[in-house]
Image (spheres, rainbow, N blue to C red):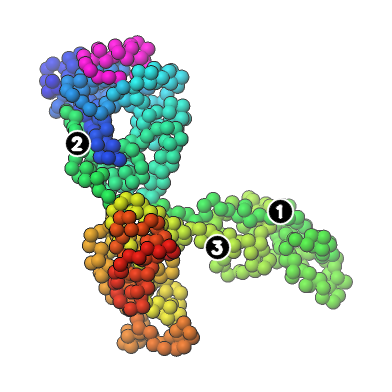
C-alpha cells in the first residue's frame, strides 16, 4: 500500500525495498472502433510525498544511482497489479534501452514475470515501451534484446517519437510494432496545418516500416477527431481516460461520443509558400558573355552565329556590367553607317548598363515582385543570372512570366492567394471524406450578385476587398470545428456544413454580408441604391448594390458517388438563387457529373 509514511522510508532505495510504489494504468484507445486497446502502466510514489509523481521519483533515483533498480521495480509492481484481476487488452511497460538490455542479460522473460509475483500474465499481452531519454550506445545489443522479446510474443513500442531525442534510424532498424508520437504534434492540431502534414509523413513512414502509430497527449475532442480522421490507429490522453489504480473497460463518455460519431474533422490547411522549391536556377540559360571592350562588330558576329541567343551579357572579371539585347542591337546595326561609325567601338556604348540581375537561388516569391517593378525592360531584354554576384547565364522575360503564373495557379489550387482559404483540391478532398463518412451534410455555393459592375466601376483593388469581405463573413458565421469554407476562385465560395443549424447560418451570412457590403459603395451609390455601369453586352444601365446569394443542397448518405457530383448539385442551386435574385435557395439534390 502506497500511503505516505515518512518514518518508514527516506530514500528511493527504501521505497523499492518496502514495496511502497503503486502502479496506475492509463487506457490506450483504438481510434477505429472506440474500444480500449491497452493500458500503459505508470508508477506513483507514496501519496502526498515529494516522490508521488514519476519525474521527481526518477530524478531522486538518478542522484542515488539506483535508476536501473527503480525501472525493474516499476515493471514488477505493474505486472503484479495487472495480474490481480481479469484483464483484457495489452499492458504497456516502460523500459529504457539500457535497462532492458541489462535485464534480459541477467534474467529470462519468464524469470522477470515470476519475480514480480504475477500469475497469468502472458508475454504476448505485454508491450515493452522503449523510452528514448538517452542515446542508444549499443544498438546491436538492443536489437538482440528486442529479437528475444519478439520470440516470446512480446510487442515493441517506441515512446515520444519526435521529442528531439528520438531516432528515425532506430525506428528503421528496430521496426517496432507501435510508435508513440510525442504530444507536441497533437496539441492544438486543429490550428496547425504544419503539424498535420508532419503526422501524414509519419503515417507514411509507419506504413513503410510496418508500424502503427499511437497519438499521445490527446486532451480535446477536436484533436481526437483529427487523429482518428488522419488514420492514426491508437490514441492516449486525458480526453480518453486518466491514470487510475484500476484499469478501465470503457473510454470516457465524451471520447466515446467523438469516436462513434460520423462527423468528420476539418483539416487545418498548411500556409503554403508558393515557391515549392522553385528558384531562378530553373530559368537559367547557359550563354556566352563578352568583355566591356569587345567591339560591336565582334558582338554582331557572335549573334549571327547563334540564332537562339536572345541577348549577350557584358562581364568584367566575372561580374556582369551590362546586357545587350539581340533585337535592339541588330536593329541598330542595320542602320546606315552604324558599322562604319561604331563597328570598332566598345559594345557598352549602346548596351543596357542597368540590367535586371537575379541571383541563382532567388525564390519564386521574390521573382513575383519583379513582375510589378517599375522597369519592365526585362520582358523583352531578359535578365542576367548570377551566383554570389558572379555571372552564370541568362534568363528570358517570357520564362519568368510563365514560371510565376504557373506557381500562382498551382498555389491557388491549394489555397486562394487573395483570401488564403482552401482551394479546389482541399475542397474536393473534404467532400470525398464527407461522402466516405456516411453522414449527411449540406453543400453550399456562395456567389455575388451584380459584382462585375462594381468591379468595373471601382477597380480591381476595391473588388478584391469585396471578395475578402465575403471570406471574412463566411468564416465568422461558420463553426470552424465542423464547417469547411473554401474559395473556388473569383467571387465563388463553397461551404460544407456539418452544423445542424446550417440554414440559419446561411441566412445570417447573407444578411451580414449585404449590410457590410454597403460600406464599400460611395455615398452617391448608396443614395441611388446602385450604380450606372455597362452590362455584359456593353450597354449602360442601372445595377443594384452588390449582394450575396447561397445555393444549398442537402446531401444524404449514398446519394452521390463523387465530389464532382456534389459540386454540380451545389452549382445548380447557386444558379437558381442567382437567377431568382434570392438570398438562400435549397434545392432537391439531382446528381450530375460535372465539377466546380
**N-term mark: 3 or 1:** 1
- For the point 75% across and 56% down, which residue is it? 289
- For the point 40% across and 64% down, which residue is it? 592
Identity of the residue furthest to the right in this view = 340
Q: Is residue 83 left or right of residue 471?
A: left
Q: Along the line of sight, which residue is nearer the eye, 450 or 512?
A: 450
Q: Is residue 238 left or right of residue 492?
A: left
Residue picked out by circle 1: 286
Residue picked out by circle 3: 405
Residue picked out by circle 2: 250
Instruction: Judge the density around disc 2: few (<14), some (14-19), many (≥20) Cα neighbours within 10 Å.
Output: some
Q: Is residue 5 left or right of residue 119?
A: left
**N-term mark: 2 or 3:** 2
Q: What is the secondary structure assignment of the residue under circle 3? A: helix
Instruction: Judge the density around disc 3: few (<14), some (14-19), many (≥20) Cα neighbours within 10 Å.
Output: few
- For the point 38% across and 50% down, which residue is it? 193
Q: Is residue 116 magenta?
A: yes
Q: Nearer the viewer, mark 2 or mark 3?
A: 2
Amino acid at each position: 500500500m502506497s500511503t505516505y509514511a515518512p518514518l518508514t522510508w527516506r530514500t528511493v532505495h527504501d521505497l523499492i525495498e518496502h514495496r511502497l510504489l503503486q502502479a496506475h494504468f492509463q487506457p490506450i484507445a483504438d481510434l477505429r472502433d472506440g474500444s480500449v486497446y491497452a493500458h500503459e502502466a505508470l508508477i506513483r510514489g507514496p501519496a502526498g510525498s515529494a516522490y508521488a509523481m514519476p519525474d521527481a521519483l526518477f530524478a531522486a533515483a538518478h542522484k542515488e544511482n539506483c535508476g536501473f533498480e527503480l525501472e525493474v521495480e516499476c515493471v514488477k509492481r505493474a505486472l503484479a497489479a495487472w495480474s490481480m484481476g481479469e484483464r483484457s487488452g495489452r499492458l504497456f511497460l516502460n523500459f529504457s534501452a539500457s535497462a532492458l538490455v541489462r535485464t534480459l542479460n541477467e534474467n529470462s522473460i519468464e524469470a522477470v514475470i515470476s519475480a514480480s509475483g504475477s500469475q497469468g500474465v502472458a508475454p504476448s499481452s505485454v508491450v515493452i515501451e522503449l523510452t528514448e531519454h538517452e542515446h542508444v550506445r549499443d544498438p546491436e545489443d538492443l536489437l538482440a534484446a528486442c529479437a528475444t522479446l519478439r520470440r516470446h510474443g512480446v510487442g515493441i513500442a517506441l515512446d515520444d517519437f519526435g521529442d528531439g531525442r528520438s531516432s528515425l534510424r532506430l525506428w528503421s532498424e528496430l521496426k517496432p510494432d507501435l510508435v508513440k508520437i510525442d504530444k507536441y504534434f497533437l496539441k492544438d492540431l486543429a490550428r496547425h496545418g504544419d503539424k498535420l502534414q508532419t503526422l501524414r509523413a509519419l503515417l507514411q513512414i509507419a506504413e513503410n516500416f510496418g508500424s502503427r502509430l499511437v497519438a499521445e497527449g490527446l486532451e480535446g475532442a477536436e484533436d481526437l477527431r483529427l487523429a482518428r480522421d488522419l488514420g492514426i490507429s491508437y490514441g492516449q490522453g486525458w480526453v480518453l481516460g486518466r491514470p487510475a489504480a484500476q484499469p478501465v473497460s470503457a473510454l470516457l463518455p465524451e471520447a466515446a461520443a467523438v469516436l462513434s460519431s460520423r462527423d468528420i474533422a476539418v483539416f487545418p490547411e498548411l500556409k503554403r509558400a508558393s515557391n515549392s522549391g522553385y528558384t531562378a536556377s530553373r530559368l537559367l540559360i547557359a550563354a556566352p558573355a563578352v568583355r566591356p571592350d569587345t567591339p560591336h562588330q565582334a558582338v554582331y558576329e557572335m549573334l549571327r552565329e547563334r540564332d537562339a541567343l536572345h541577348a549577350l551579357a557584358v562581364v568584367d572579371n566575372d561580374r556582369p556590367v551590362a546586357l545587350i539585347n539581340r533585337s535592339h542591337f541588330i536593329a541598330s546595326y542595320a542602320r546606315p553607317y552604324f558599322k562604319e561609325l561604331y563597328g570598332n567601338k566598345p559594345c557598352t556604348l549602346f548596351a543596357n548598363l542597368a540590367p535586371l540581375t537575379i541571383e541563382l537561388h532567388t525564390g519564386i516569391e521574390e521573382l513575383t515582385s519583379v513582375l510589378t517593378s517599375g522597369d519592365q525592360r526585362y520582358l523583352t531584354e531578359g535578365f542576367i543570372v548570377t551566383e554570389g554576384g558572379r555571372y552564370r547565364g541568362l534568363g528570358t522575360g517570357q520564362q519568368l512570366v510563365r514560371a510565376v503564373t504557373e506557381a500562382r495557379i498551382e498555389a491557388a489550387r491549394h489555397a486562394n492567394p487573395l483570401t488564403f482559404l482552401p482551394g479546389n483540391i482541399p475542397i474536393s478532398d473534404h467532400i470525398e471524406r464527407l461522402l466516405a463518412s456516411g453522414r449527411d451534410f449540406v453543400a453550399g455555393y456562395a456567389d455575388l450578385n451584380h459584382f462585375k459592375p462594381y468591379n468595373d466601376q471601382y477597380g480591381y483593388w476595391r473588388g478584391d476587398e469585396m471578395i475578402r469581405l465575403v471570406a471574412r463573413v463566411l468564416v465568422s458565421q461558420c463553426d470552424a470545428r465542423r464547417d469547411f469554407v473554401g474559395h473556388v476562385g473569383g467571387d465563388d465560395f463553397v461551404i460544407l456544413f456539418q452544423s445542424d443549424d446550417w440554414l440559419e447560418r446561411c441566412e445570417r451570412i447573407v444578411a451580414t454580408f449585404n449590410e457590410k457590403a454597403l460600406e464599400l459603395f460611395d455615398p452617391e451609390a448608396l443614395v441611388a441604391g446602385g450604380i450606372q455601369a455597362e452590362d455584359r453586352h456593353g450597354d449602360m444601365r442601372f445595377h443594384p448594390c452588390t449582394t450575396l446569394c447561397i445555393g444549398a443542397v442537402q446531401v444524404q448518405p449514398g446519394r452521390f458517388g463523387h465530389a464532382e457530383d456534389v459540386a454540380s448539385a451545389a452549382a445548380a442551386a447557386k444558379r437558381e438563387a442567382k437567377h431568382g435574385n434570392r438570398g438562400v435557395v435549397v434545392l432537391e439534390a439531382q446528381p450530375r457529373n460535372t465539377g466546380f
